[in-house]
C-alpha cells in the first residue's frame, strides 16, 4: 500500500469514528448536587448521640463525593426536638437521627425497634432487625408516615438513673417524680411514679430545679457530660428498661426514591457503618467514664433490689401484652420479637453469662 492510500484510509477511518462518536451523548462531566437537611432531638455534639448523628451526615456527604450533601440541625435549631419525625414525614426535612420510641405516639410498635424492658441487648437487637424480619416489620410501621428507617447503632445497656434518695422498696417508687423514656416510663407510671419526659437538653435543669426527683438519661459517658452527678447522689445500674436501645436514621421515602441507585446504597451503607461506630463509641466511653464518676465525684452506686426487679418485670410483661393487643401489626411484631428474645435468652445464658462469670474469676 502506497503512502498516499494509507493517509487517505487513515483520514477516512478517523472521519468514520468521529461520525460514530457523534451518535452517542457526551459523558456527563458534572452531576447536579443534592442537598438534604437532617434534624435530630439531640443537643449539638452531645456525646454518643449528637456526635454520631453528625457522623451520619458527614459519612453520606463524603461517600457520595459531595453529590449528596447532608446538613445537620440539632434539637431546636430547625424544629423542636420532639417534632423531628413530623418534619421528615411532611418533607420539611429530609431525614432524622433519633431513637424510635420518641415517636410511640404514632405507633406503640416502635418500642420494639428501640428496646423493651428486660429485652434484647445491643448485639441481639440488630440481629433481629437485619436477619429476623425486624427490618421488614419496621418498614411496615413507617410506611404509613412516608418514612424509611435504618438501624444506626446502640448505647449498650443503659443506666437505671440518678436518684436524690435511695430506692429500697417498690413503695419508694410510688409518687416519685422521674424523668424516664420509653416503656420504662409506662411501667413506672403503672407502679405509681409520676413520669415526666423532657428533651435531653432539659434533664439537668429539671433535676437542678427539683422539677423531678430522679432521671435516667443514657450511661456513664453521657451522664457525666451532662453533669447529672452534680444534682443527685445515687446512681442505679443497670437499667431494667433499656438493655440495648437502638438508634435510627429515618428518611422521607419520596426523597429517597428520587435518588439514583448508587446514592440510595450510599445512604443505606452510611447508616450501617455508623451503627458499628456508634456502639463501639458508647462501649468505650461508658467504660472509661465510670471511673471518674466513682473516684473523682464520689457517686454512690446502687442496684434495684430483687423485689423491685420482680415487680418491674411483672408490670413490663403486662405492658407488652397490652401493646400486642392493640392491632394486628403490633401482634405480629410482638410475636416475632418475643420468639427471638426467648432464643437469645437461652443462648446467652449458656454463652455470654457463663463467659462473664469465668472472666470475673480471673480478672
Image: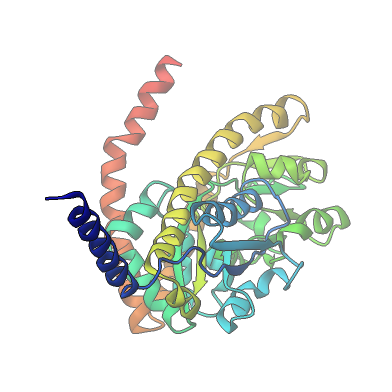
User: Which residue ends up furthest to the right in the rendered image?
Assistant: 209
Q: Where residue 303 sits: x, y (%)?
A: 58, 40
Whether residue 221 is situated above or below residue 185 in the rendered picture: above
Q: Nearer the viewer, residue 16 or 104?
A: 16
Q: Residue at x 27, y 57 (%)?
A: 131
Q: Is residue 301 left or right of residue 116?
A: right
Whether residue 10 is situated above or below residue 15 in the rendered picture: above
Q: Residue at x 81, y 54 (%)?
A: 207
The image quarter containing residue 28 is bottom left
Q: Where residue 208 sits: x, y (%)?
A: 86, 53
Q: Residue at x 41, y 66 (%)?
A: 27
Q: Where residue 324 sits: x, y (%)?
A: 38, 75
Q: Residue at x 30, y 40 (%)?
A: 349
Whether residue 88 is situated above or below residue 241 in the rendered picture: below
Whether residue 229 is situated above or below residue 207 in the rendered picture: above
Whether residue 184 can be seen here: yes
Q: Nearer the viewer, residue 11 or 296?
A: 11
The image quarter containing residue 296 is top right
User: Which residue ends up furthest to the top in the rendered image?
Assistant: 362
Q: Where residue 229 sits: x, y (%)?
A: 77, 40
Whether residue 322 can be seen here: no
Amino acid at each position: 500500500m502506497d503512502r498516499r492510500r494509507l493517509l487517505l484510509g487513515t483520514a477516512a477511518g478517523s472521519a468514520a469514528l468521529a461520525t460514530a462518536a457523534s451518535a452517542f451523548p457526551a459523558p456527563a462531566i458534572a452531576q447536579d448536587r443534592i442537598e438534604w437537611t437532617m434534624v435530630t432531638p439531640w443537643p449539638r455534639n452531645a456525646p454518643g448521640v449528637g456526635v454520631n448523628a453528625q457522623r451520619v451526615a458527614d459519612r453520606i456527604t463524603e461517600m457520595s463525593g459531595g453529590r449528596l450533601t447532608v446538613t445537620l440541625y440539632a434539637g431546636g435549631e430547625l424544629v423542636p426536638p420532639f417534632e423531628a419525625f413530623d418534619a421528615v414525614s411532611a418533607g420539611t426535612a429530609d431525614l432524622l437521627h433519633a431513637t424510635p420510641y420518641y415517636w410511640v405516639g404514632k405507633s406503640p410498635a416502635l418500642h420494639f425497634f428501640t428496646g423493651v424492658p428486660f429485652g434484647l441487648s445491643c448485639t441481639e437487637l440488630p440481629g433481629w432487625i437485619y436477619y429476623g424480619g425486624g427490618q421488614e416489620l419496621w418498614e411496615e410501621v413507617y410506611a404509613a408516615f412516608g418514612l424509611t428507617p435504618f438501624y444506626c447503632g446502640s448505647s449498650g445497656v443503659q443506666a437505671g438513673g440518678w436518684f436524690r434518695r435511695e430506692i429500697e422498696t417498690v413503695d419508694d417508687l410510688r409518687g416519685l417524680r422521674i424523668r424516664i423514656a420509653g416503656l420504662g416510663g409506662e411501667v413506672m407510671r403503672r407502679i405509681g411514679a409520676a413520669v415526666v419526659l423532657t428533651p435531653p437538653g432539659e434533664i439537668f435543669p429539671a433535676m437542678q430545679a427539683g422539677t423531678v426527683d430522679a432521671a435516667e438519661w443514657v450511661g456513664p459517658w453521657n451522664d457525666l457530660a451532662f453533669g447529672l452527678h452534680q444534682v443527685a447522689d445515687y446512681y442505679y445500674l443497670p437499667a431494667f428498661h433499656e438493655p440495648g436501645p437502638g438508634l435510627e436514621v429515618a428518611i422521607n421515602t419520596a426523597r429517597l426514591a428520587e435518588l439514583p441507585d448508587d446514592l440510595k446504597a450510599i445512604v443505606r451503607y452510611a447508616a450501617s457503618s455508623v451503627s458499628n461506630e456508634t456502639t463501639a463509641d458508647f462501649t468505650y466511653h461508658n467504660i472509661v467514664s465510670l471511673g471518674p464518676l466513682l473516684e473523682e465525684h464520689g457517686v454512690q452506686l446502687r442496684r434495684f433490689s430483687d423485689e423491685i426487679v420482680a415487680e418491674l418485670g411483672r408490670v413490663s410483661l403486662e405492658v407488652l401484652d397490652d401493646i400486642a393487643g392493640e392491632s394486628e401489626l403490633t401482634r405480629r411484631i410482638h410475636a416475632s420479637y418475643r420468639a427471638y428474645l426467648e432464643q437469645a435468652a437461652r443462648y446467652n445464658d449458656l454463652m455470654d453469662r457463663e463467659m462473664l462469670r469465668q472472666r470475673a474469676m480471673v480478672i
